[in-house]
Image (cartoon, helix red, strand yellow):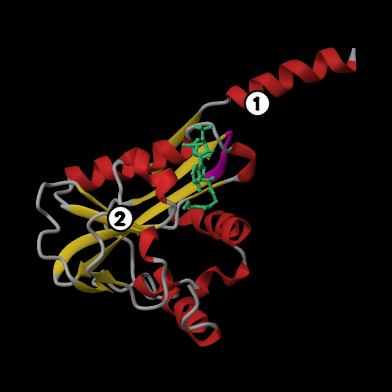
Amino acid sequence: MTALRKTPVALISGAAPFAIRSERASDVVAREALLDACFGATRHMRTCQRLRDGRAPAEGLALSAVRQGLLVGTVRLWHVSAGGVPALVLGPLAVDPSCRKLGIGRALVQRALAAAKAGGHGAVLLLGDAPYYSRFGFSALTTGQLRLPGPFEPDRLLDLELREGALDGASGMIVPTGMAAPQGKPRLAARSRKLAPRAA
Ligand SMILES: CC(C)(COP(=O)(O)OP(=O)(O)OC[C@H]1O[C@@H](n2cnc3c(N)ncnc32)[C@H](O)[C@@H]1OP(=O)(O)O)[C@@H](O)C(=O)NCCC(=O)NCCS
């Protein structure tokens, strides 16, 4: 009897739909907890964090995945200059471990890329696993001339042009160009910088 009751619950839970929507202020606590769970307490030490410290994400390009009323995924994109060429950097992307392999990560990335393209952005960069991001068209083939403000593995620096030629001539340091984060967030960034300036 117990087994009969448990089975349908598991099936329904596994099949529960999710929604991708713009991030809300009320998502922040859950988002930060999810990122801590996925990347660990030292996540603020990562090189890509130097591109986000004290900045707000690009407008309309902070997304949340919600399932059964809970935040289960997040992705944000950030304005950068890629050696003088305007671009976006994607990250962090994270999905709750209990909800993986349901297509939530794919949906977050696809929705973010579509929104970036619709917003007129020409290119997206990221530091991540090529075996995952290649399914969206990202590759390391043309990022060899780019650098990040900290240590990184070159074969993990990936790009995707949303507009052909958008990264032509992109060479040199990737630096943040986004607007300052609303008051309150820079304090966290400043604290992270003090803790751990240059780890990957
Ligand atoms: C990467 C991540 C966002 C994928 O989320 P998800 O919702 O499970 O993604 P999807 O359901 O769209 O895709 C799952 C597929 O991606 C694959 N995958 C997940 N992470 C991968 C990785 N690092 N490299 C290669 N493939 C990966 C899974 O094996 C699965 O493959 P399948 O479709 O053949 O079964 C999630 O695993 C995560 O949050 N990881 C920890 C944080 C992280 O590493 N983020 C950045 C990725 S570099």
Query: Residue 178 placed where, x, y %?
Result: 26, 69
Q: Give the range drawn in magenta.
A: 68-72
The answer to which of 42 and 144 lies nearer the viewer is 144
Residue 117 belongs to magenta span:
no
For label 2, count other residues whose C-alpha is less than 10 Å away and answer few (under 14), some (14-19) or many (20+): some
**In the drawing, does residue 6 fall left or right of residue 51?**
right
Q: Which amino acid does label 1 sit on?
A: Ser
Q: Residue 140 carries which label?
A: 2
Q: Give the quadrant of the N terminus.
A: top right
In the image, is 13 to the left or to the right of 157? right
Q: 12 above or below 152?
A: above
The front one of 22 and 14 is 14
Q: Quadrant of residue 40?
A: bottom right
Q: Which mark is in front, 2 or 1? A: 2
How far from the left and from the top, in percent, is residue 57?
Answer: 33, 61
Q: Name the residue under label 1.
A: 13
Task: Name the amino acid, label 2.
Answer: Ala
- SS label for mark 2: loop
